[in-house]
Amino acid sequence: MDLLFSKDSVRDTTISSQDGRPIYHISTSETLENERTTITKFHHEMAVIQLMNLYGVETCRVWGRDMAPKEGYGLTSVYQIALCSKHTFTASNGRRYTWKKGMLQDDYHREVASFEKGHKGLLSGRPSSARFSIAHEELPIVDDIVSTFVMVEQQLRLAKQIKTGSEIVDNVMTILGT
């Protein structure tokens, strides 16, 4: 099954079926301390993801069940969390899955879902939407897959922002000679 994103960003987007039918709507609100993402499926709040900007405290609830990836967690910051090469969670079917660089693998290391960024079409001449491909046998846990993907991608984005901010501070300190 292929799902199409209205934007490359997982912060504020609509995810639709190939025939254009909206399935999920993702919206993110931000404060100085954290950001909260809500995933709505067919007008019902399905999942809530909350990231704490400084301390890496997060929640990911899908239909009320905790889905936050556990492997690589317990670290002291979002930046350290994002540096982990894999993020493992237990889905509602009781099986463990691992996210690695936009690809989801099951316990047997088979690829069961993957994300492909969209293209503007500058080189190919044909623009394409960001695409999320999910193996048919994993459709019963599609809500778990979409929610954990959004959470991991947001943590990676946040870690990049933190890294960029610390590099700017380091550069300013170097210029000031302190």
Image (cartoon, rainbow, N blue to C red):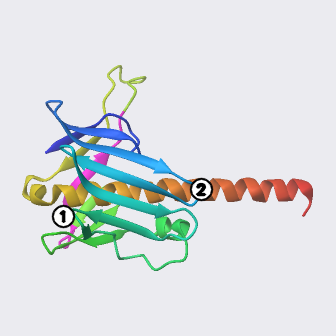
Identify residue for label 1: 110
Q: Residue furthest front?
A: 44
Identify the magenta region.
106-118
Residue 29 pos. (x, y %): 46, 48
Q: Nearer the viewer, residue 112 or 71?
A: 71
Q: Position of residue 75 (x, y in %)?
A: 50, 78
Q: At 32% across and 56% down in the image, what residue appears? A: 149
What is the three-letter code of the residue carrying label 2?
Leu
| Above-or-below relation of 74 to 87 | below
Local secondary structure at mark 2: loop
Q: Is residue 123 above or below residue 89?
A: above
The picture quadrant where one finds residue 53 is bottom right
Task: Tell me, yes or no, whether the highlighted magenta stretch contains residue 45.
Answer: no
The N terminus is located in which quarter? top left
Q: Tell me if residue 171 comes above or below residue 26 in the rendering.
A: below
Q: Amino acid at mark 1?
A: Arg
- Give the residue number, with chain letter if any, for mark 2: 32
Q: Is residue 112 among the parts visible in the rendering? A: no
